[in-house]
Every structure is written in C-alpha cells, then in structure tokens.
Amino acid sequence: MTANAPTRVGRFYTSARRHPWVLGKVADWRIPLGPYTPAQIAVAVVGGFLLVKTIAWWSWMGPVPIAAWLLAIWAVRRPKIRGRAPMQAALGWLLLGGQPQGGRIGGRAARDRASHPLLSGFTIEGPPAPAAAGVPSPAAGQRAARSPRASTAAARSSSRRRPEPAAPVGPVSGVQQLLALTAQRGGVR
C-alpha cells in the first residue's frame, strides 16, 4: 500500500444510535407521559388546534373527539411507512414529486432521443452463376492475390455500391419459386 493511498474506513452503528429523536424534557420540567416523537407532537398541536376551532361541530358528541385525539397521539408513537418514519416518508414523497418523469442519469434529467424514420430496403438475388469447369473466374484470381486488409476494404467499398443484377437463374428458394409462380399466373390480385 502506498503512502498517499486513501485509507478505507468502515462504520457500524449499533441500535443505540438508531433510536428516534424524541422530546422528553424541557429545561428541568419532565413532560408527562413522555418522551414524545415529532409525529406525536405534530398530531397533538394540529389536532388540538382543530378541536378548539371546531368545538361547535362536535360538542354534542361529548368526550368522544377528545378521546379519539388522544388515541391518535398514542397511535403515532412508532409509526412506520415501509420501514420509514412518517416525516422521512413525507419528505420522500415531496422529493419524488419534484423528480423528472424519466428519472436522472448522472445528475441530469434523462431524456429520450428524438425519433427519426428508419429507411432501408433489401434485394433478393439468385445464386452466383457457376464457373466453367477448370477455368477460374477473373474475380477468383483477384481475390487470391489480395491481402486480407485489402479484401476487407474491398468488401466495405463493395457493400456501399449497388450490386449488379446477376444473370437470371431459375428460382432456388421456396419464396423465389412462389414469386415465379405468381408472375407466370398473372400477378397478385
């Protein structure tokens, strides 16, 4: 290991470091039935405010809304939304709403490339004409004389040019036989 190579540090946090943030004491005064989580504090404050503002609506029910409010405070003491605390889950949903629809790649918004037409074609050719027995064709002699590098360059350049039509030979494949048969009968109707 060299002297200027970074050292690798591994950390393991025990369950004692994973305890939730709670509020149990204010100065020297201990909160009754505490400690309370941030979710409990939020439900207590918001729920108490709503109960005071809407007392005319629920006063005929007696202590039922107050009992429901206290039960709600107790119920959110250790809530988990897919293994996360409610405030972290709410923050996650807010951040998810601000993400681009396609996601991010390398910190930037991922975009699809613009569409463009794909134009192509194909040619059906017959097999090459057979060479006369014992007489090599001039193309075969040229192929043998070339180096491998020259033959690949020639193949690349020949693929760019349009192939010359081959001498008419009888149909070989099944598709060619069907095309020839329909041509003899007068085409496709």
Image (spheres, helix red, strand yellow):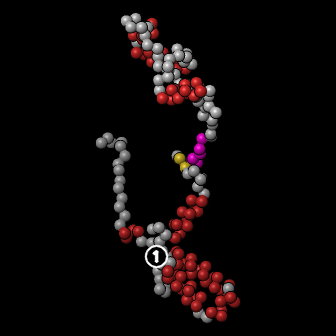
Task: Please provide the residue range marked out in magenta.
Answer: 107-113
Q: Amino acid at mark 1?
A: Arg
In the rendered structure, the answer to whether residue 134 lies left or right of residue 170 reads left
In the rendered structure, the answer to whether residue 8 lies left or right of residue 150 reads left
Q: Which residue appears at 45% of the width and 9% of the height?
A: 139
Q: Position of residue 176 (x, y in %)?
A: 51, 26
The answer to whether residue 68 is above or below residue 148 is: below
The answer to whether residue 28 is above or below residue 189 is: below
Please, what secondary structure does the residue beneath circle 1 have?
Answer: loop
Q: Which residue appears at 62% of the width and 40% of the height?
A: 114
Q: Position of residue 169 (x, y in %)?
A: 50, 17
Tell me the residue that label 1 is attached to.
Answer: 78
The answer to whether residue 144 is above or below residue 74 is: above
Q: Quadrant of residue 122?
A: top right
Q: Which residue appears at 47% of the width and 86% of the height?
A: 33
The answer to whether residue 122 is above or below residue 75 is: above
Using the image as rendered, state which of residue 1 and residue 114 is in the foreground.
Answer: 114
Q: Which residue appears at 55% of the width and 16% of the height?
A: 165
Using the image as rendered, state which of residue 36 and residue 130 is in the foreground.
Answer: 130
